[in-house]
Image (cartoon, rainbow, N blue to C red):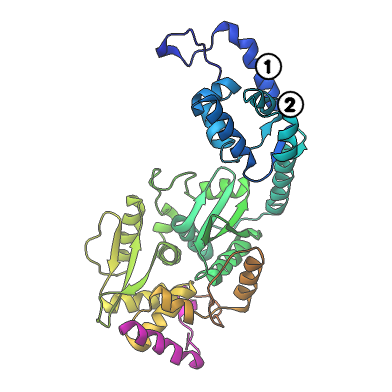
């Protein structure tokens, strides 16, 4: 930022008319000038050397170079962005015992075109658009049970933006569930979502579909674009009115924002807990379960629990779950009387061949995933389908399940 040194202290951010030409020339220089790629650590070293020699603060050095304090201290100082050649030469001139030849030889690795960053960013953007381009999207009827379940999943762990949808699930415990959700999206909309793990958040796996047509359809179905808490999202009215659709929607909601847990240490009882920071959604979920005949204590401001054991069993019989994590927890609870913790679940959770392939793909991209074990179960067509299999845990896994529970008791 170019400041007018003669301006009053309260108006130091105001440019003087004499500095406009300087400002425009510096802006043009920053845009069209060649960029310098420094050797690792040398860009910051040069900045600190100039700063120390001149006795400058970061703010003062920024003024000398015609940029903001944030740019010189953050963008350049931590080597987040490359520096323009013209500004760098001017900076070297401020430091008398350094000459440009010395800097070029010992500090700079290469010189790049002024628009090299835009070229890379454009190529990445084109590739993302190619991967996410939706060509032959189709839409189901509102009476579809799978659509009701998908609405519940979106209300739980989904985000609806102007350009598409994103669903975030836990990795690695929900790899099988991520594949299930992907299949549901494909069945409903004839679209295969892109799956990825972000380097800065390896504990989440994201399913992404970019389609404004899909957004328009979901808005028409009663969903809201933007922040779910601020917008006070609710279960759509057409779902609340139909008990069958309500069962499927509650399954999607509790599979994402709820789960089965131990009621209390050293007690052979389980509970189902649902948590949401959207109070209208919390209320709709609570009242939906009441409408289906469940009895629960008074709800809190962000959560409620299904605590009676007969209601917990009824939940898995009437509503069910599509999430392998919950299938395994409930099966082990029925067998041993205890719900396994996350650490135990990582060792004993059945994993399908498709989930193993997905894990291998993620590992190839540098994402570390804890080991899990072998086989998952297929989805039935009824609302309690995935939990109503005769034996959710193969006999060969029973010893492992009991061992995990025994280790928890000690």
Residue under label 2, please give it.
Answer: 32
Query: Does any portion of residue 108 appear in the rendered image?
Result: no
197 is higher (above) or lower (below) than 91? below
In the image, 265 versus 70, the foreground residue is: 70
> Going 41% across and 73% down the picture, which residue do you hit?
342
> Is residue 23 toward the left or the right of residue 310 in the image?
right
Locate the N terminus by quadrant. top right
Query: Mark 2 vs mark 1: which is more N-terminal?
Result: 1
Residue 202 locus on image (x, y percent): 53, 61
Q: Name the residue rendered at 47%, 46% in the picture.
A: 224
Name which quarter of the figure residue 186 lies in: bottom right
Q: Is residue 144 above or below residue 278?
A: below
Check disc 1: other Cα within 10 Å, few if <14, some if 14-19, many if 20+: few
Q: CA distance from mark 2 to mark 1?
A: 11 Å
Question: Which quadrant of the figure has residue 180?
Answer: bottom right
Rendering coords of residue 294 (x, y %): 29, 70
- The x and y percentages for residue 346 are 47, 76
Q: Is residue 391 highlighted in magenta? A: yes
| Pointer 2 local density, CA inside 10 Å: few below 14, some 14–19, many at least 20 | few
> Which mark is drawn over residue 25?
1
- Where residue 407 appears, as percent x and y from the top left, is 36, 85
**SS assignment for the magenta stretch, majority:** helix
On whether residue 102 falls in the magenta region, the answer is no
Instruction: Give the secondary structure at mark 1.
Output: helix
Residue stretch rendered in magenta on the structure:
383-410
């Amino acid at each position: 930022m170019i400041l007018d040194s003669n301006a009053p202290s309260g108006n130091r951010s105001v440019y003087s008319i004499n500095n406009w030409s300087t400002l425009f020339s510096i802006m043009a220089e920053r845009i069209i000038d060649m960029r310098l790629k420094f050797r690792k650590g040398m860009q910051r070293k040069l900045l600190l050397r100039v700063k120390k020699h001149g006795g400058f603060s970061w703010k003062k050095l920024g003024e000398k170079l015609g940029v903001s304090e944030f740019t010189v201290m953050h963008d350049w100082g931590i080597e987040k962005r490359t520096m323009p050649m013209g500004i760098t030469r001017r900076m070297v001139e401020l430091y008398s015992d350094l000459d440009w030849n010395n800097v070029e030889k010992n500090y700079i690795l290469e010189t790049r075109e002024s628009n090299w960053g835009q070229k890379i960013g454009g190529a990445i953007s084109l590739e993302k658009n190619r991967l996410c381009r939706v060509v032959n999207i189709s839409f189901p009827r509102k009476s579809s049970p799978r659509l009701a379940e998908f609405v519940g999943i979106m209300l739980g762990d989904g985000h609806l933006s102007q350009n598409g949808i994103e669903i975030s699930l836990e990795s690695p415990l929900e790899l099988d569930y991520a594949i299930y959700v992907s299949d549901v999206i494909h069945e409903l909309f004839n679209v295969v979502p892109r799956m990825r793990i972000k380097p800065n958040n390896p504990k989440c796996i994201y399913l992404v579909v970019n389609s404004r047509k899909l957004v328009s359809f979901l808005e028409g179905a009663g969903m809201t674009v933007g922040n779910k808490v601020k917008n006070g999202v609710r279960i759509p009215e057409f779902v609340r009115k139909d008990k069958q659709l309500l069962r499927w929607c509650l399954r999607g909601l509790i599979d994402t924002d709820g789960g089965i847990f131990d009621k209390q240490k050293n007690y052979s009882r389980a509970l189902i807990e649902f948590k949401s920071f959207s109070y209208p959604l919390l209320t709709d979920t609570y009242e939906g379960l009441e409408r289906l005949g469940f009895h629960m204590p008074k709800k809190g401001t962000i959560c409620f629990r299904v605590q009676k054991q007969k209601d917990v069993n009824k939940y898995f019989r009437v509503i069910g779950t599509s999430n392998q994590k919950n299938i395994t927890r409930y099966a082990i609870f029925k067998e041993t009387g205890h719900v396994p913790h996350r650490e135990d679940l990582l060792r004993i959770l059945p994993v399908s061949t498709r989930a193993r392939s997905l894990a291998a793909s993620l590992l190839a991209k540098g994402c570390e995933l804890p080991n899990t074990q072998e086989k998952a179960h297929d989805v039935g067509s009824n609302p309690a389908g995935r939990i109503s299999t005769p034996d959710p845990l193969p006999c060969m896994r029973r010893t492992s399940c009991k061992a995990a529970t025994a280790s928890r008791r000690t």
